[in-house]
Image (cartoon, rainbow, N blue to C red):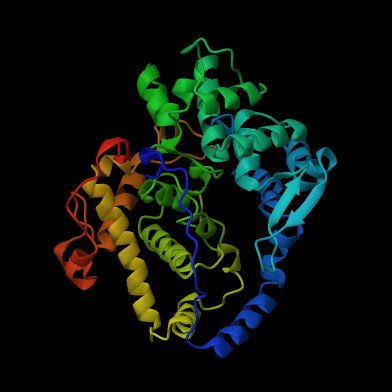
Amino acid sequence: MLGAKRVKAISVRGAAVAGVADAASVQVRARDLAARSTGAATEKYRALGTAANLETFDRLRILPRRNFQTVSIGQAAARRLAPEGLARAGEHVRESCAGCTIGCDHRYGGTRIEYETQFALGPLLDVDDPARLLAAAGACDALGLDTISAGGTLAFAMECAERGLVDWPLRFGDDVLPWLRAIARREGAGDLLAEGTRRIAAVIGQGSEGFACHVKGLELPGYEPRAMQTFALGLCVASRGADHNRSGAYQADLQAGVDRYRADVARAPARVIEAEDNAALLDSLILCKFLRGAIREPWREGAELLTMVTGVSRGEDDLRRSARRVAAVRHAFNVREGWTLAEDRLPDRFHDEALEDGASLDRADVAAMVDAYHAARGHIPSGGPSERLRRELELDAWLTDAPLQGPASLG
């Protein structure tokens, strides 16, 4: 929304240091969390970062390739793009946020790399050269482009070109540096590509909408929905589109006892809601999500931290209610801006095309999961919080009826 208002950033400088209600308790808890954050739950992030996921996801056959046409690039190619291969292409340096004990920021040749960047600028574009991946990631950083959206948009453009729907000289496996610059400068075809996958598909037409891999206009992250069907629901209902940060539902698919190839109408909605609420809790407390494995009881510990810092006594139920309110306000905002249930869907590709191993995603099953999710959230069928939910969460104090104006609106 800031971009629609042509605002690049807001800088705020305070004149005083904010205090805490119980400084001694905060210090004790901070030392405890720091100690826990150096344990086994965060070892992967310290040693290699999320880039360590790529080989594992390739082996599990959930690593998308060539605009989600297929999965897996093979272990030899995956190894080239894994941290060890990247280290041969550029010096490896580990950095961290101020005071962080995890240090998940891994840079190769000066460029920060994590799994989503690997996926979007590597397998999604059918690129397995670590030097080219690093160059593309560095260009995105320099040009201010999101790597997931840049990779997803270019992958869609490559497929359109290979199908003969456009005459752009762009094919899977090509060098994308000139295209990234064209997007950032809105030059030539880059002027349309800068609009993102959904709007490109609307211009090109010719059936391209069916393989335009986005939800609500946001390009998909690096998990194959046909092989992670709880996450498929999480993508459909995510308030800002295909989103893996406000819903860690992909974690549910990788838990023991969960059949990730099954659309579980009975259990998936509760799993997605719990993932969304946990993410809202950590975001609201301004805690790093990589601490999630080290925090044993997030709701209890979150309530204790809030009381220590603010002096306002809050319990687990209060925090759960606040997380539910966050989800309800986001949904109500979307409804106000024109959302309909038709937005909570995946592109046709994921329903009409099975993977090589036969994995498929039934359209009716997904629709049933979406309906069950909204019912469990307390949303009325036509969209928006029910009167009961509005009263329970006291939402009227948080909602207005005035829609946004201009390009920030959905559409």
Residue sitting at 74 percent across and 48 percent down?
A: 107
Tell me the quarter of the image containing the C terminus. Answer: top left
Seen in the picture, residue 44 relative to 315 is either above or below; the reply is above
Residue sitting at 54 percent across and 58 percent down?
A: 251
Seen in the picture, residue 127 relative to 162 is either above or below; the reply is below
Seen in the picture, residue 396 relative to 29 is either above or below; the reply is above
Nearest to the observer: residue 362 or residue 138: 138
Nearest to the observer: residue 198 or residue 372: 198
Q: Is residue 263 visible?
A: yes
Tell me the quarter of the image containing the N terminus. Answer: top left
Residue 99: name its quadrant: bottom right
- Measured as percent of width and height from the top left, residue 253 is found at 52, 56
Q: In this view, does 223 lie to the left or right of 112?
A: left
Residue 278: name its quadrant: bottom left
Nearest to the observer: residue 124 or residue 366: 124
- Measured as percent of width and height from the top left, residue 129 is found at 75, 31
Q: Is residue 71 visible?
A: no
Residue at the left extreme? 387
- Measured as percent of width and height from the top left, residue 197 is found at 44, 30
Q: In this view, does 236 lie to the left or right of 304?
A: left
Seen in the picture, residue 310 relative to 253 is either above or below; the reply is below
Residue sitting at 42 percent across and 61 percent down?
A: 276
Q: In this view, does 46 lie to the left or right of 404?
A: right
Nearest to the observer: residue 251 or residue 390: 390
Q: How many marks?
A: 0
Residue sitting at 58 percent across and 90 percent down?
A: 24
Residue at the front extreme? 15
- Measured as percent of width and height from the top left, residue 32 is found at 64, 82
